Image (cartoon, rainbow, N blue to C red):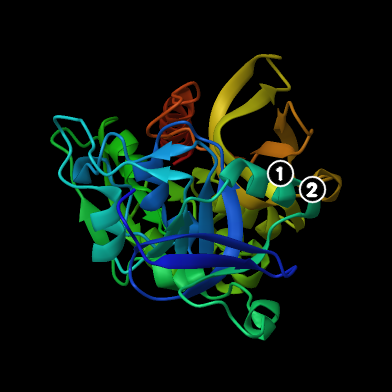
Amino acid sequence: MKNRRKAWLVLKDGSVYEGQAIGADRDCLGELVFTTGMNGYIETLTDPSYAGQIVIQTFPLVGNYGIIPEDFEGKPHLRGYVVRELCETPSNFRSEGTVESFLAEHDIPGIAGIDTRQLTRKLREYGVMNAAIVRTPPESIEDLERFFIHGVVEECSVKKPVKHECMDARRRVVLIDYGAKENIIRELTSRSCEVIAVPYNTPAAEIRAFSPDGVMLSNGPGDPAENTEAIAVIRELLGTVPVFGICLGHQLTALAAGASTYKMKYGHRGANQPVSDTITERTFITTQNHGYAVDPASIKDHGTVRYINANDGTCEGIDYPGLSCFTVQFHPEACAGPKDTEFLFDRFIAMMEEFRHAKGHHD
């Protein structure tokens, strides 16, 4: 890399790593997490679910295909960025800039020249921890001890309803936006759904006033249990309209149904998480980004665990029989992939059609 200012990555346990400053010329504080994807760094940088976090890319070379605005998933909300080696001369006919320029433009500090795999091994052993990227070594780590992530769903959500139309709309979906990725909207509009994205705390009565055929609960950042308003809205909607929840939407639905969630040691972040369907016994490779999970023991009569993680047995999806609702912890809309579970959007479409038919027949 060209000559750069020094920077330091300081962890809550007192560890200090020296590297080179990249991106915005300022310090930052956040929860240090790692993602294992070999590609998809653009999607990582623009995924609102990373709000409040400093992200480590375990893959050693980042930026080799540049920055492609068409592939953005949303507005970036991550606190900082940690890489082993940053490519300064990307080669891609679609590229419109470098990771360095992207970080600077969006005021995101970063650090390069760090052994990210060694750092990841530390987090796998001791769990995620607070960290700071600083331009001068700190005299104290008190700020690291006090930091915690809160209020990030409000930060990432739309502020007013936004309509996303499609040419051949045959149904309407209200997307409750907790920090939604753009590809959720693309998957729905490509299936003839008009999508209305609404703020995270929109009352159930206002959602029903849109006369939706279904409600989509998006991904998002932070501790699901702190979102009491959103949980209350979902509780009121369940059973009255078909519901499909992804990631944070999955966790919030479980809480609304009476289950509980817990913080994982280091979470699942990457594009290679194996998930098994307990009914078909088929295993899919999925993209994930979460640090909390639903406690399967707390689900009991509230729902049925449909998907489990083939590595650690954690809950990856729940069906709610009789409520026209299902949720998954992983990302079926994943971009840049894998695309193994895109069929879940078709399942949602079929559920909406079945619900509409049953309601019409009943009426």
**Is disc 1 placed on a helix, strand or loop?**
helix
Along the viewing direction, whichever of 176 and 36 lies nearer the viewer: 36
Which residue sits furthest front?
3
**Residue shown at 79%/54% (left/top)?**
126
| Rendered view: 94 above or below 282 | below
> Dividing the picture into quarters, in which one does residue 345 lie?
top left
- Residue under circle 2? 125
Label 2, residues with CA under 10 Å away: few <14, some 14-19, many ≥20: few
- Residue under circle 1? 121
Along the viewing direction, whichever of 126 and 148 lies nearer the viewer: 126
Q: CA distance from mark 2 to mark 1?
A: 6 Å
**Residue shown at 56%/53% (left/top)?**
248
**Residue shown at 47%/48% (left/top)?**
83
**Is disc 2 placed on a helix, strand or loop?**
helix
| Rendered view: 333 above or below 14 | above
User: Could you tell me if the residues under marks 2 and 1 are in contact, i.e. CB atoms within 8 Å?
Assistant: yes
x, y percent for residue 221: 53, 60
Compared across the picture, whether 301 is left or right of 318 comes to: right
> Dividing the picture into quarters, in which one does residue 339 lie?
top left
